[in-house]
Image (cartoon, grey):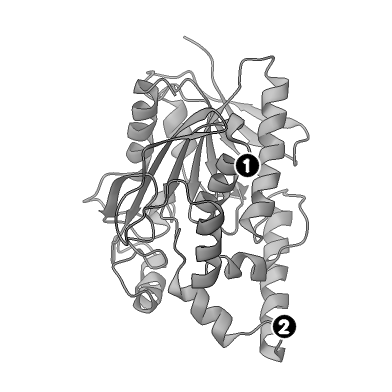
Amino acid sequence: MKKLFAVSLLTLGLGLGFSQASQAATTESQTKNPIVLVPGIFAFDSIAAIDYWYKIPAALQSQGATVYVPKINAFDSSAKRGEALIAQLDNIRATSGGKITKFNLMGHSQGGITVRYVMNTRPDLVASVTTMHTPHKGTRIADYVTGLLPANTLVGVAFNTFANTVGDIVNLLSNNKKSPADIRAMLTEFTAPGAAANNKAFPIGIPTTTCGGGAETASIGGNSIRMYSWSGTGKLTNALDISDPLFNISRLAVPEENDGITGKCSSHFGKVLKDDYFMNHLDATNQIFGAVSLFETNPKTLFQNHASRLKSLNL
């Protein structure tokens, strides 16, 4: 059986670091095109013992998938993050000897906006786009933060300085040599006006009704692309999950069922696979350290099942 590799991109379009994975036991997740897991804010792949996608790449590889996790700025606009991702995808394709031409992009939270940018600007790189817990129509939390901490005020400047310092530290610890973090660029695109502007610029896959679904397939520049999304509305999903109390406070700011950050309807993009998993915002990536609900489909299984779906579509 084919030997597979877990890939972590070490710099923006410069060099690849490979770590060999165990031989795949099955081929259920062996998609035609590689899977790229694109993180949301903080955007690290691994810091010490903390993996953003906790055990998800290994779960996919165990069923035959080829998986990449890109290096992207912790805090920045999705356009700049998207350009960084494009450079890395181009590098993978160029060094594959013609074996890789397209990718199945899967983005969590802001990563979903990032992959939509890539889909619309470089559709030749994309076979499918899947977003998880992504606030496509913004999140009220961003409106509150930007309203309480205006950029041109003393408190706003202090917030920017602190948050950007945190972002730069995250980039450093994850060996992510990117431009300085820009928390304001990230926040602005998740306000109601910012999200509306983004959806006007890139409407493909966004539902035309308040809480409907979008098209499953789009043709962009002669490239046929499949589009999917899923999200959750879970509260107190695991007694060991330290993010549950935080999200049960933040969820009060969002005027619809939500995961602590992303509203149920705001998460809709392309074909909505499910929007009410018993998961909070971080459960989607199997955090924290796998402390997810025992009474819901495990996130690792969700990714394996979706990879199997893409495989059946020859993607």
- Percent coordinates x, y for residue 99 in the rendering: 61, 15
Task: Name the residue beneath numbered marker 2.
Answer: 157
Lower sequence index among marks 1 and 2: 1
Q: Residue at x 41, y 55 (%)?
A: 133
Q: Position of residue 101 (x, y in %)?
A: 60, 22
Residue 286 visible at all: no
Q: Amino acid at mark 1?
A: Thr
Quadrant of the rendering where the C terminus is positioned: top left
Residue position marked by numbered label 1 in the rendering: 121
Query: Given this view, does label 1 or label 2 mark the residue nearer the observer?
Result: 1
Left or right side of 250 for 222: right
Pointer 1 and pointer 2: residues touching (CB < 8 Å)? no
User: What amino acid is found at the position of numbered circle 2 in the picture?
Assistant: Val
- Separation of marks 1 and 2 at Cα, in angstroms: 33 Å
Image position, residue 187 (x, y; %): 58, 69
Q: Quadrant of the rendered structure where residue 9 is?
A: top right
Look at the picture and state if 33 lies above or below 55: above
User: Which residue appears at 38% of the width and 54% of the height?
Assistant: 283
Q: Is residue 81 left or right of residue 225?
A: right
Whether residue 41 is visible here, answered yes or no, is: yes
Seen from this angle, which residue lies furthest bottom?
154
Residue 149, which numbered label? Answer: none
Q: Residue furthest left?
A: 295
In the displayed structure, 91 sits above or below 175; it is: above
Along the line of sight, which residue is nearer the eye, 294 or 133? 133
Picture coordinates of residue 257, whole percent (x, y): 28, 67
Where is 71 relative to 15, above or below?
below
Q: Secondary structure at mark 2?
A: helix
